[in-house]
Every structure is written in structure tokens, then in C-alpha cells.
Image: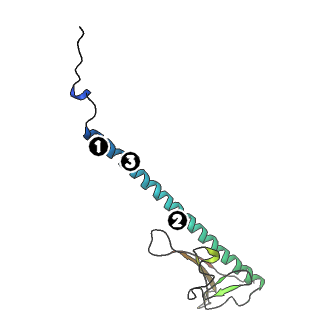
Amino acid sequence: MGKRHIPTVKERGDTIIEVLMAMTIIGLTFAIGFNIANNGLQTGRAATERGEALKIAETQVEVLKASLSDDVVDDFEVSTPYCVLTLNTREQNPASVPGSNCNNLNGSFYNVRLDYNAPSGGDPASYRSSVTWDAPNSEVPAVVELFYRPYDEN
């Protein structure tokens, strides 16, 4: 009759400790992977929001430039903040009017504001286009600002 093989302790299979350690390592790997993916998504979202805000600020400056050069609207030099809705339309005082079209412009969650800085002490007149919005995971609103200074061709 043949010899019968008796398994040793190492050949009997995995112990509960080994299984728990393997599950812990797998769980940690998944948690780290999820965290990296989540951070990537948040970074992408923040970049998209900043790009959209920059596009809105650039549009405000471009419409302002067209209005100033074509003399379509000759009273853009105002002390009250405003935003430009169309080439011929602007809305004053967006910061203090809750229902202003400058807040949540065109249904977005961006707040738009144009400021005129009068010439002083040799400094030329300038305009500031600022767009603010509530950034994710931040207690302070995010801001994009563009400055425009018209120049004389003389």
C-alpha cells in the first residue's frame, strides 16, 4: 500500500489573519485610488469653472471695448459698478441689487461686475471686469479679474 500524504501546517491553506491582512491591503488600495480620482475630478472642475469665468470676463471687456470705440454708449464712465448685458444694454449696481441680471448671469452661478477707475494723478482711466463664484471646497469665493485701459491713438 502507498504512503499517505499528511499535510503540514503550511499546506493547509490561509489563516484568518492572512485573509484579513489581504483584505486590508486591497481596501487601502481602493481607498487611495478613489482619493486620487476624486482629487483629479475636483481639479478638473475648478479648471473648467475658472475657464468659464475668464470667458465671461473677456466677453465683458470685448463688449466694453466695442461700445467705447463705436460710441454706441458714451456713458460707460460711471462710478457705480455694472455689467454689460448686450452691446446697448448694461445693468447698474449688480452688487447691491439681489435680482440683478449681473448676478447669476444668463442662468449661470457667476456674478459679474465692471468697475470704472477714473484717471487720477497721471494714471489713465481703466476698467476692471471681475467674475466671482462659489468654488467647491472653499469658504471664500473664487475670483477672476481682467483690467482694460483704453488708449488714445493720437
Q: Are marks 1 and 2 in contact (CB under 8 Å)?
A: no
Amino acid type at circle 1 is Leu
Q: Residue at x 74, y 82 (%)?
A: 67
Q: CA distance from mark 2 to mark 3?
A: 26 Å
Which numbered dot is residue 20? 1
Question: Which image quarter is the C terminus in?
Answer: bottom right
Provide residue 100's location: percent of width, then percent of height.
Answer: 61, 85
Where residue 95 appears, x then y in whole percent? Answer: 56, 86
- Identity of the amino acid at label 2? Ala
Q: Amino acid at mark 3?
A: Thr
Q: Nearer the viewer, mark 2 or mark 3?
A: 3
Vertical position of residue 75 compared to residue 51: above or below: below
Residue tagged by mark 3?
29
Picture residue at 44% right of the left edge, 74% below the top: 139
Q: Earlier in the sequence, mark 1 or mark 3?
A: 1
- The 10 Å Cα crowd at callout 3, few under 14, some 14 to 19, many 20 or more, is few
Evaluate if marks 2 and 3 touch, with contact meaning CB atoms under 8 Å apart.
no
Q: Earlier in the sequence, mark 1 or mark 2?
A: 1
Do we see residue 153 in this rendering? no
Badge 1 local density, few (<14 within 10 Å), some, or many (20+)?
A: few
Residue 52: x %, y % from top left = 61, 68
Q: Nearer the viewer, residue 28 or 11?
A: 11
Q: Is residue 66 left or right of residue 34?
A: right
What is the x, y in percent for residue 20?
29, 43
